[in-house]
Every structure is written in C-alpha cells, then in structure tokens.
Image (cartoon, helix red, strand yellow):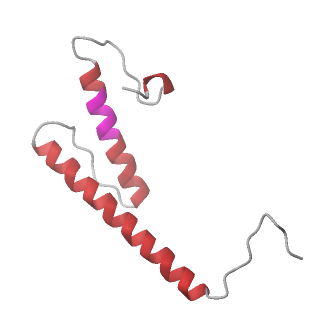
Amino acid sequence: MFHAEYPAMSENLGADYAELLKQYRDLAAGVRMIRRALDKAFRAGLLPYERTGITPLEECEAIARAIYAAAAKQALGPTSSSFHPDDPADAGH
C-alpha cells in the first residue's frame, strides 16, 4: 500500500547512498574549514579556545560555544551588561 506522505524508495539505492556519502564528506570538510578559522581567531586572541569535537555535531557544538563566548565577552563591554546565547531575545546580538 502506498502512502502519499512517504515517497517511493529509489530504484537506485547505490546512487542515493553515494550522494549521501558525498554530502556527508562535504559537510565534514565545511566543519573542518570553520574549525581552522576558529583556531586562527583563537591564535589572534579574538575567540576563546574550544577543544576539538570527535563527531561533526560535537565539533559544531564546540565552535558554537566559542562564538557565543566571544559574543558574550563583546556584549559585556561598556554598552551591555547581559548576554545569554540561548535566549531568543539575544539572537540578534
């Protein structure tokens, strides 16, 4: 029985898998590129150091924490006294 909300499986699962694998590799390469930029910013004293993650998700979490910490440090400057990176009201900072 075919359900409209579920697309039919591809006839060529090998090609689908190869495309997913390529997308994963591209994503991992992008995360590494951002990590290199984060490391360079750390060496320049612009961002705090965050340890490298093992999985792409852990790596993204570490990068996000470093950016949030830098934003908080900037926001705590002379014009602002509070910044909470998880607060939707601070999303525009």
Establish if 81 lies above or below 44: above
Q: Is residue 92 magenta?
A: no
In the image, is 9 to the left or to the right of 56?
right
Numbered range of the magenta stretch:
65-71
Establish if 36 lies above or below 85: below
Q: Position of residue 69 (x, y in %)?
A: 30, 32
**Which residue of the protein is positioned furthest toward the front in this rendering?**
4
Q: Position of residue 67 (x, y in %)?
A: 30, 38
Establish if 42 lies above or below 36: above
Residue 92, picture quadrant: top left
Residue ID at (36%, 16%): 82
Q: Which image quadrant: the C terminus?
A: top left
Residue 15, picture quadrant: bottom right
Which secondary structure class fits the magenta region best? helix
Q: Position of residue 18 (x, y in %)?
A: 49, 82
Q: Which image quadrant: the N terminus?
A: bottom right
Q: Position of residue 62 (x, y in %)?
A: 34, 47
